[in-house]
Image: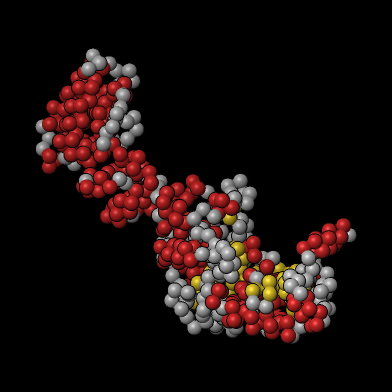
Amino acid sequence: MTENTAPRVRIAPSPTGYLHLGTIRTALFNYLFAKKEKGIFILRIEDTDTERSLPIYEKDIIEGLKTLGISWDEGPDIGGPYGPYRQSERKEIYREYIKKLLDEKKAYWCFCSPQELEEERKAMLAAGIAPKYSGKCRHLTQKEVEEKIKSGQKGVIRIIAPTSTTIEFNDLIRGKITVSSEIIGDFVIAKDEETPLFLLANAIDDSLMKITHVIRGEDHISNTPRQIIIQKALNFEIPKYAHLPLILAPDRSKLSKRKMETSFVEYLKEGYLPEAILNFLVLLGWHPENDQEILSLEEMIKLFNLKRIQKSGAVFSVEKLDWFNAQYIKNLPLETLVERIKNFVPAAWLEKEEILKKAVVVERDRMKKLSEFKELAEFFFEIGEWEVETLRWQGMSLNKVVLNLKNLYDAINKIDEKDFEISKLEKEIMPLAETLGRGESLWPLRVALSGRKSSPGPFEIMWVLGKKETLSRIEAAIKKASELL
């Protein structure tokens, strides 16, 4: 790999669950790096866990990334020059390399039972030695191996790790990392000659797919020296590594698996916008030089630099995610926002599109999530039951409430339908409200229109409802209050 080689990076999720935020962040950082450096971004599906890997999860991963605007140049759905891009379709490739390692005496069969391994581990710990495999099966003859396999004895394949040496790599985020081979020992790379484990399959695929940079979570740091051992044993070129910081809870403890692995689809169902989620995630462990917070995908690409990824953990804050989402809701084009909100409201509301659109205008600044719109805007479509006492402003009498509402009704009735705009309504009604008392007039009016203690202002509500419905609700409130006099 020369300095002029166009970077090739990959995201390699396992389809054993739905797409979650950890995978999205890793995919995003790889995608941004590839786009910024004019490189190639690859999607590879690591589905060697045949029991847990399901097509529904693969479909969810692919569709979720596309929804976020993250696209790839090579992958299982579009192909490419180094396919197949599903590990389940690469078994012959793995078999070839496992056989090569065995034939070259760089790997061997191990038949130690779990009980033996556990006793060995305990003995090493008792002696104050870091536990690792002793290598006792390394010297089995070919004949002994064949006899054990023939007899049905279960075994695994281990690679021979170097001794008395240091494994070193330059992490592009953390700098030089060194690990003594003495603490590693011969580790398992395959269940048998056809079934590689993650470390081996991952290393083979990265080499054959010409991956130049491996950008992944810091939980893989301990895997990197082992993969370098595999790469050297197979005479593979060693890619550059960059390990992203952990995502932490607000108290800086490790984020719970439940929160981290909440599926992307669940966030969409709650009413988070894909653009907001992406913006939130890119700032978990990275920030641009100008500390800009609201970033489009195009701006992320322009500003992205691996050197600005932090080493320390990044705090996951739902409050911060909500803030980002609220900003994006406020700034979405109205037509786009209305279309997205349609997925969160009853079908009957869609028949009143003009009211829906106006309600969105009025409520958009109060929303943190699209799912909140239904509760915020419900009274525009059906006022429901409410208590007469809510009409009182600071203990004013019901007589005063009724009188003020009647005065307001008469004033509103004189306004032409075409003048039912917020500014015009305010201009016409405020002089009367000042005369009657702002609180004593505008509070009962707002409650009469909404049935709520908390809602947008009365002029905004009137604009949404229109003249006929506005007068109808004021009339109903007057009647309701009068019955208690």
Within the image, what quadrant is residue 441 found in? top left
Within the image, what quadrant is residue 156 found in? bottom right
In the rendered image, the quadrant that contains the C terminus is top left
Residue at left offset 56%, top offset 78%:
90
Measured from the top left, where is residue 417 in percent x and y?
Answer: 12, 39
Measured from the top left, where is residue 99 in percent x and y?
Answer: 68, 83
Q: From the viewer's side, name the closer residue of 191 and 60.
A: 191
Q: Is residue 58 above or below residue 262?
A: below
Residue 416: in sight, yes or no? yes
Q: From the viewer's side, name the closer residue of 323 and 11.
A: 11
In the rendered image, the residue lying farthest to the top is 485
Residue at left offset 21%, top offset 46%:
352
Which of the colour schemes (rainbow, by chain, secondary structure, one colour) is used? Answer: secondary structure
In the rendered image, the quadrant that contains the N terminus is bottom right
For this view, does 123 lie left or right of residue 156?
Answer: right
Q: From the viewer's side, name the closer residue of 146 and 467.
A: 146
Measured from the top left, where is residue 479 in percent x and y?
Answer: 20, 22
